[in-house]
Image (cartoon, grey):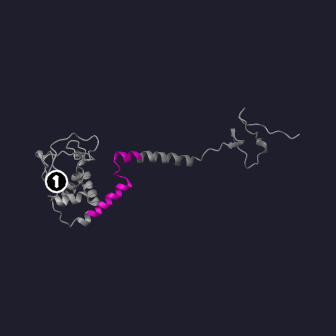
C-alpha cells in the first residue's frame, strides 16, 4: 500500500495533503499552513529593498499631494509650462505699445495668451489683498458684478495705475510697466461675473456691460 502524504493544512480546509519530505531540495522551504484549490504557498516575504521602495512611493505621493494643494498647483508641470509660455510672451510683447482703451482691453480679455500673462501678473502682485482667485480678502471681490470707482472697462487701468482710497488700493503705476497694467486690467475685466464661491460680499455698484464704445 502506498504511503499517504501528511496533511499540513488546517483542519477542515479541504486542501490536498502535502508531504514536505517529498519536495525537491530546491523547492523545500517554509510552507504556509493554508491552501487554496490544493495549492500551498511558500512563506517568502518581499525583499527589504522592495518594501522600502513601496513605502517611499507612498511618502512621496503624500508630500507631492500636500505641496500641490498648499501651492494651488503652482509647482505642477502644467504651471511650469504656463509660466514658460508667459515669460516667452513677455519677451515678444516687450516692444509692443498697448493702448489703455476699451477695444484693446476687450480684445486682450479674450486672448488666451494674454490672459495667462495677466493671471501671472495678478498672482505675483495682487493675491495678498484680492485672494488667489480674485475672490476678495482685505480688498474687493473681482469676480462678482460690483465695482468701486469703475464705471467702464478703461477705469480698471486707472485704478491700478493710480490707486484709490488713500493708498488702501496702492498705485502700481511706478511698479509695473504700462503694458503689464493693461494686461492685468484685461484679466481682471475677464473675471467679471464668474462669482468664485465663498467670495467677499459685493461692494460698490454694477456698471454697464463692458463695451468698446
| Relative image position of residue 78 (x, y in whole percent) | 37, 55
Image: magenta residue range: 65-89
Q: Quadrant of the N terminus?
A: top right
- Residue 32 shows in the view: no
Could you tell me which residue is drawn at 41 percent across and 46 percent down?
A: 65
Residue 68 on the magenta span: yes
For the residue pair 122 and 206, the one nearer the viewer reads as 206
For the residue pair 21 and 189, the one nearer the viewer reads as 189
Could you tell me which residue is drawn at 52 percent across and 47 percent down?
A: 54
| Relative image position of residue 173 (x, y in whole percent) | 14, 55
Q: Residues within 10 Å of mark 1 (few under 14, many from 20)?
A: many
**Element under label 1?**
loop
Left or right of 170, for residue 18: right
When asked about the image quadrant of residue 111, the answer is: bottom left
- Residue 144 shows in the view: yes
Dominant SS of magenta comes to helix
| Relative image position of residue 121 (x, y in whole percent) | 24, 55
Left or right of 35, for residue 4: right
In the depicted structure, whether residue 11 falls above or below residue 146: above
Residue under label 1: 153
Residue 203 on the magenta span: no
Amino acid at each position: 500500500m502506498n504511503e499517504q502524504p501528511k496533511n499540513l493544512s488546517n483542519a477542515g480546509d479541504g486542501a490536498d495533503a502535502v508531504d514536505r519530505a517529498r519536495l525537491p531540495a530546491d523547492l523545500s522551504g517554509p510552507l504556509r499552513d493554508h491552501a487554496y484549490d490544493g495549492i500551498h504557498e511558500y512563506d517568502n516575504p518581499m525583499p527589504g529593498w522592495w518594501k522600502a521602495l513601496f513605502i517611499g512611493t507612498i511618502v512621496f505621493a503624500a508630500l507631492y499631494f500636500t505641496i500641490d494643494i498648499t501651492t494651488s498647483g503652482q509647482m505642477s508641470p502644467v504651471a511650469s509650462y504656463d509660466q514658460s509660455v508667459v515669460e516667452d510672451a513677455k519677451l515678444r510683447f516687450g516692444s509692443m505699445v498697448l493702448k489703455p482703451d476699451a477695444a484693446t482691453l476687450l480684445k486682450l480679455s479674450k486672448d488666451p495668451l494674454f490672459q495667462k500673462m495677466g493671471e501671472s501678473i495678478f498672482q505675483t502682485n495682487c493675491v495678498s489683498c484680492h485672494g488667489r482667485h480674485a475672490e476678495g480678502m482685505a480688498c474687493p471681490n473681482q469676480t462678482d458684478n460690483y465695482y468701486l470707482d469703475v464705471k467702464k472697462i478703461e477705469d480698471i487701468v486707472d485704478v491700478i495705475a493710480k490707486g484709490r482710497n488713500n493708498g488702501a488700493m496702492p498705485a502700481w503705476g511706478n511698479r509695473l510697466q504700462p503694458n503689464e497694467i493693461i494686461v492685468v486690467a484685461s484679466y481682471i475685466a475677464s473675471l467679471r461675473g464668474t462669482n468664485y464661491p465663498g467670495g467677499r460680499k459685493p461692494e460698490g455698484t454694477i456698471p454697464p456691460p463692458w463695451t468698446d464704445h
